[in-house]
Image (cartoon, grey):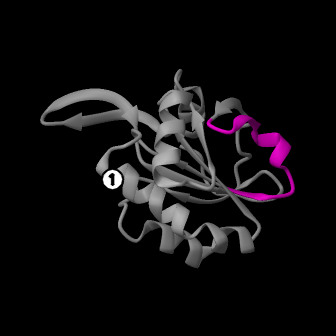
């Protein structure tokens, strides 16, 4: 897991709005949030929270990017259905989640499996991690990130 002060790993990936490369966002703050799956209850609440606060993030000079292992096609449907004003990154090989430490072992009903652990990273304009939110609880998370910016 990355820590405050670490350099954010660069990545280039497809999104529902074209290709994105983190290093091309240098000079801007980036709120990079990892979530398990499009169109699931918790992930929908979280995405809609970021949607509803989009103007506030923009006013603070932040770009929001959501990351999951879902396909670009799935992201496009999810984004259109909920009118998301930010891009969703397709991390189908889990390389981005692994680089950020968000791809970890999870347990559900006693069964262990690998998956995305809901987490958020605030990346400063200098490319360094400013804040880490690990094992995020959806309710209140967006407000917490905003308050800490």
Direction from residue 137 to residue 87 in the image, left or right: right
22 over 86 or under it: above or below: above
Magenta residues, as a range?
16-30
100 over 30 or under it: above or below: above
- Residue 10, x across and y down, in percent: 74, 36
Q: Residue at x 84, y 42 (%)?
A: 24
- Residue 131, x across and y down, in percent: 61, 61
Q: Residue at x 38, y 32 (%)?
A: 115
Q: Nearer the viewer, residue 92 or 94?
A: 92
Query: Looking at the rendering, which quadrant does residue 9 occupy?
Result: top right
Q: Is residue 110 magenta?
A: no
Q: Nearer the viewer, residue 105 or 70?
A: 70
Q: Residue at x 39, y 50 (%)?
A: 43
**SS for dot 1:** helix
Query: Looking at the rendering, which quadrant does residue 132 occupy?
Result: bottom right
- Residue 74, x across and y down, in percent: 47, 32
Q: Residue at x 57, y 78 (%)?
A: 147
Q: Is residue 26 magenta?
A: yes
Mark 1 = which residue?
42
Q: Nearer the viewer, residue 143 or 110?
A: 143
């Amino acid at each position: 897991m990355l820590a405050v002060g670490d350099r954010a790993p660069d990545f280039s990936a497809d999104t529902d709005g074209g290709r994105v490369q983190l290093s091309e966002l240098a000079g801007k703050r980036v709120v990079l949030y990892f979530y398990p799956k499009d169109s699931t209850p918790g992930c929908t609440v979280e995405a809609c929270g970021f949607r509803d606060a989009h103007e506030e993030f923009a006013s603070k000079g932040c770009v929001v990017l959501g990351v999951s292992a879902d396909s670009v096609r799935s992201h496009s449907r999810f984004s259109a259905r909920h009118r998301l004003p930010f891009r969703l990154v397709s991390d189908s090989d889990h390389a981005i989640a692994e680089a950020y430490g968000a791809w970890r072992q999870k347990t559900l009903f006693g069964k262990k499996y690998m998956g995305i652990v809901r987490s958020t990273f605030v990346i400063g304009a200098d490319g360094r991690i400013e804040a880490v939110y690990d094992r995020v609880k959806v309710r209140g998370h967006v407000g917490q990130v905003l308050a800490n910016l």
